[in-house]
């Protein structure tokens, strides 16, 4: 065999090796993608209540973040020290200030209604007829009332809730906003739907 033939055969071998490797790699990726995707919870599983993670590492003080869990909006509020300090002053104006009639995990049956005072986690559904309350965190908000201490206001029928989700007296909503089960995971992660995590 001549040197020229060997050079041509070497070029063909190299081309076939590269082409076969590329086709094999594409095939491996095409097989792996659906396989790995099958490990993620389905939409049905999420709707049935599988835990949902929320990154709260970049939340600013006074901010509201919304995520979805079991087809419901979850409100995550990072309260400022001033917001927390206003909570005791509302007690006489509230229907259920000690959350005795309300739905929340045992760890949230306190004045802050939370595991960590800084973070308030609520199901964002009014306990009257299921509307979505608006965040009206500024005291004296003109849309609510001059003596408004800050909290949530339901635009459908005028129900009001303080910065712990506790319902005011003389409004249609009968109960405080519900608190879902949750825990804190590593790296500023909030796990909604699971009470197992780092406190």
Image: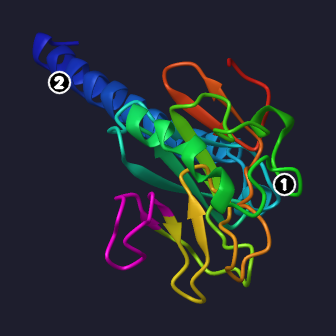
Residue at mark 1 to residue at mark 2: CA–CA distance: 78 Å
Give the residue at the far left of this rendering.
4
Q: Badge 1 is on which residue?
A: 103
Side of 194 where 137 appears, left or right: left
- Percent of width and height locating residue 4: 10, 17
Q: Residue 155 versus residue 54: which sits nearer the camera? A: 155
Q: Main secondary structure of the magenta part?
A: loop
Side of 110 where 120 appears, left or right: left
Q: Residue at x 69, y 67 (%)?
A: 71
Q: Residue at x 34, y 34 (%)?
A: 58
Q: Residue at x 53, y 52 (%)?
A: 163
In the rendered image, which quarter contains the N terminus?
Answer: top left
| Residues drawn in magenta | 135-151
Side of 81 where 100 appears, left or right: right
Residue 169 to residue 143: above or below: above
Q: Residue 165 versus residue 45: which sits nearer the camera? A: 165
Earlier in the chain: of badge 1 and badge 2, it is 2
Q: Badge 2 is on which residue?
A: 8
For marks 1 and 2, give the one nearer the viewer. Answer: 1
In the rendered image, which quarter contains the C terminus?
Answer: top right
- Secondary structure, mark 2, is helix
Give the residue at the far front of this rendering.
92
- Percent of width and height locating residue 51: 73, 43
Q: Is residue 145 magenta?
A: yes
Residue 104 to residue 60: above or below: below
- Percent of width and height locating residue 131: 62, 81
Q: Residue at x 65, y 67 (%)?
A: 168
Q: What label sits on residue 16 in the rendered view?
A: none
């Amino acid at each position: 065999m001549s040197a020229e033939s060997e050079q041509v055969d070497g070029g063909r071998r190299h081309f076939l090796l590269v082409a076969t490797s590329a086709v094999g790699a594409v095939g491996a990726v095409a097989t792996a993608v659906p396989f790995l995707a099958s490990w993620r919870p389905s939409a049905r599983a999420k709707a049935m209540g599988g835990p949902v993670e929320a990154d709260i590492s970049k939340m600013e003080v006074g901010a509201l973040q919304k995520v979805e869990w079991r087809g419901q909006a979850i409100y995550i509020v990072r309260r400022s020290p001033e917001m927390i300090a206003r909570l005791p002053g509302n007690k006489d104006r509230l229907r259920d200030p000690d959350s005795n009639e309300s739905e929340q995990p045992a760890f949230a049956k306190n004045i802050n209604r939370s595991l960590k005072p800084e973070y308030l986690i609520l199901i964002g559904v009014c306990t009257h007829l299921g509307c979505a309350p608006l965040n009206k965190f500024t005291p004296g908000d003109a849309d609510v009332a001059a003596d408004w201490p800050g909290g949530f206001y339901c635009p459908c029928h005028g129900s009001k809730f303080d910065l712990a989700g506790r319902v005011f007296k003389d409004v249609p909503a009968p109960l405080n906003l519900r608190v879902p089960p949750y825990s804190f995971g590593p790296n500023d992660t909030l796990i909604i739907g699971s009470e197992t995590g780092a406190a």
